[in-house]
Amino acid sequence: MLKNANLKCIAALATLATLAFRPTAFGDITYTLHLGSSSEDLQVSNSVVTAAAIYNQYGSFNKHWDVYYNPGIPTAEANYNGYMGFGSQRTVRVALHEGGHTLGMGTGPNYGALLVNGVWTGQYGKQAQLDTYNSPDGLRGDGHAIWPGGFNYENEDGFIERIWHVRIMAAIRCDMGILAFSKEARNELVHPGQTAELRVESPLAATYQWYRNGVALMNGGDISGATSPVLRIANAELDDEGSYRCAITGAGETLFSRPRQLWVVPAQQLGQWDMEGNVTDSANTNHGTAFGSPAFVPGKIGMAIDLDGVDDYVALPPGVGMAKDITVATWVNWDGGGNWQRIFDFGTGVHQNMFLTPRSGDGTLRLAFKDAINGISREQQVNTTLLPTGQWVHLTAVLKDNYATLYVNGVAAGSVFNVFDNPIDFLPTQNYIGKSQYADPLFNGRIDDFRVYNYALTGAEVWDLWGQSNNQAPVFTVGTITLPDATRGQAYADSTLSTYASDADQDALTFSKVGGPAWISVSANGTISGTPGLTDEGLNVFVVRVTDPSGASSDATVQITVVSPPADLDAGPVAHWDFNDPDLGAAHGAALPDSDAYTVWRTAAIDKSGYGNHLTTWEYDWAGFQWSTNSPRGDFSIFAAGSYPVAYTWSARSLPQVNLESLVLSNFTVEALFTATGSGFKTVLGRDGRNVSTTAPDNAILYFGLEPSNRPVIEFTDMNSQTIRLLAPNPILANNTTWYHLAGVFNGTNLSLYLNGALIASTNRAMGPMANNSIGMPGGPGWHAGGWSVARGLWAGDHVDRWFGHIDEIAISGKALAPTEFVISTFDVWARAYNLAAATFDGDADGDGVANGVEYFLGSDPTDPLSPGRVLTLSDDLLSVTYPFNRRASGVTATVEWTTDLAAGDWTDAGVTYTTNASLNEIRATFASSVTNQLFIRLKLTR
């Protein structure tokens, strides 16, 4: 099973016959069979045809196979180019294994780098293994293949294992950087007027195009997201039904998703089997078929069917499973018996089903859902007290959205969340009353008034369906309650559910939280409280329940949007990276920490603004940065460690106090301190996005750097999709030696560029706030919409415009700063802001006796002889002095020294401690009590 990408077929049969197969409308794997007529050739043909059909039914792949049989091949072999050669091994399992090699297993780009000590480190492959095999050892592999799922031995073959193999192959292709779907769309069913949603996920996709019945869709009217991962069709109607698929492009190819069906059907009762001497459907035409010899006996309502637990059961037609939300209700009188009997079981077999058993292996009444083909190979369960025997009990199973509830005699007995397996996903074909998909005991007891609805009954409707009480259930006035926004990190209060619920009997009501985010609490009186944390930003959805003293209840969905605390844009920058991070390992030539394959976040540069927008960088050897002591400040800068440098914000992982990806900047200043080198466009700071600009949809939100002639440039797109570009008239030196400070400033109507504090270009145009992550595409491979990148730009979803010079510092401010206010400040930049380009550090431009460098440190005006006034101020306690300082001054340190005799060699700073009041730009120097109180003092600056 060789995998050399240059492998060629050594010999072909003399009786070679070539059969080419091209796919039907949605198949992606094609093949040419270079085969003869022997029985071995026929076996190869059958195996390859079967393997291709499996791949094309359950996955999406672009690959053409050239298939040969050669008895000289010891087993079988294949390569990434699509060659497949079969020798002594020719089964379907072997064809799937070799097909895996053509898809990248053991052969694909970055395959070896993704295996660390025999463990697959890619995010998507690991998740696919958890969702399918769920091996405690994880996804493992070697240079040849992965396991589980690699189909390395015949004992790995099986119906569900073949499907899991396809899912894992798609996942590891995502990890390797090959265009693939990490999640295919699901079937969809909605009722008229509802919103249908179809969704795909692909980390490598740069563009999306949805099709209905082969016709490309366009945004407009009720259609949105036609060119995005999520297609939405509002106010759905019958004409919207059809077969949908999504075409994605990226990594140099185009790929189509598996076709999925949308049904638009009325909300209705799908069937009612009264069991009045037969199993006909009195509400529809979904008549059942009785097996064995069930009797019909007096029931709860008229007659009931009596199943003997030996050979009696009822089969219902496939139409019973045509539901996304579903309700199944019935009266049951159980005679007891073995575990795992079924009251009902709807599915396609043991891998896809929803069932209700009176007694599980754990001794519980259990409602369970499972779809190991499309979803996770684990059951989602609602468990409650064992069903009693010898009495009539009303049971109702309700699936609504992603949670299920089991009602016993009208009372909610339990709920489970994260149920993403709807009957419509697998279209159950085996729908039983009294029989299991497995070889379990048949049901022994009576069943009456069996009903199925293609929507979720409310708690009040379930109570009425039980119908054994004159009490009326409480109700919520609306099904979805939208409450005021919460602010991350702040206590949420003053919201109550009591105003949204009513009870016709005027009973005292009790509220509870059924499920949802952990930070939310619901008290018995309906008060909602809690403090959202760093991971809770965005829309929070949870389910609440109101219950009366008899146990009757109703549920409602509650929505609270958690927003970031507002940034104080006047207080300082919203992001500031100076790359001086000794805690991260800063040292000359050391590599910045990187993130581990999108799974483990590591901080590569600390955000000194205090808002927590730290940077990370690629994990690969050919990317990222190293620290350098080449710095105009005498500290650290960074420079490219490989051919693809980039550091980037990742709000979902760094969990900042102010989210830069969503931050709206009406005014802004961006600054960078750098040297330049290289050719082409060079972006020192960018903001990622696509399909944001009306005139240039492939452009990112922000480019800040140099164009190919090395002229400084800034370009950004606003929230109204308008784009503005400003180019400096003259180039700078790209010698990787000369340090420059570049600033771009926008105040709402004017965009300006400053070089070393001097204005070099300006243009007037009214623009809206800079775009964020709310418009355009939601993200792509290796970039986050609205996120900020250092040392590369983004164009057409591709990583371009890389920066190979040194970068000492970058800052982003939420206001238009004057040059004297720039966050990044060197003496030269400061001096130019006062039109003193020729001023020296030791000079005295205003002749006030205070050197320019001292005024730079103090923050005073070097052109005003009256500034500064007094430098050192003695405090009232006579034990300390204060002096002003410029927070942005760099490369200068200050000490307070004292002496008792003014002798030249007697000055010292012994016993002096310092505290800083940054808000007042003031430093206090305090003298130890042991220092004599008769002193001469001075402020000493060192550059």
Image (cartoon, rainbow, N blue to C red):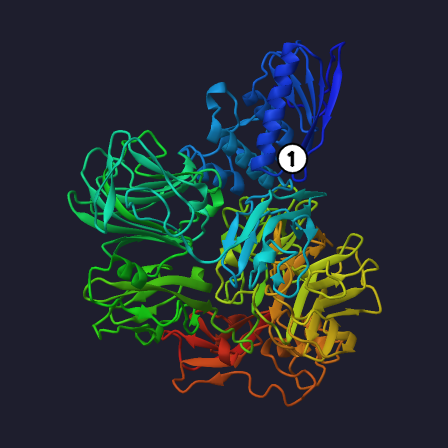
Q: Disc 1 designates what residue?
A: 109
Residue closest to the eye, 634 or 493: 493
User: What's the amino acid at mark 1?
Assistant: Pro
- In the rendered image, the quadrant that contains the N terminus is top right
Residue closest to the eye, 877 or 741: 741
The picture quadrant where one finds residue 286 is: top left
Q: Is residue 356 left or right of residue 204?
A: left
Q: Is residue 2 visible?
A: no
The picture quadrant where one finds residue 489 is: bottom left
SS class of the residue under badge 1?
A: loop
Residue 430: percent from the left, percent from the top? 41, 37
Rendered residue at 60%/60% (across/down): 787
Q: Is residue 463 visible?
A: yes
Classify 538 as above or below 60.
below
Residue 341: percent from the left, percent from the top? 27, 36
Q: Is residue 551 left or right of residue 263?
A: left
Q: Residues within 10 Å of mark 1 (few under 14, many from 20)?
A: some
Q: Extreme bottom residue here?
A: 866
Rendered residue at 69%/18% (across/down): 68
- In the rendered image, the quadrant that contains the C terminus is bottom right
Residue 151: percent from the left, percent from the top? 52, 25
Residue closest to the eye, 857 or 896: 857
Q: Is residue 25 left or right of residue 563?
A: right
Q: Extreme front residue here?
A: 277
Residue closest to the eye, 776 or 306: 306
Residue 209: percent from the left, percent from the top? 67, 52
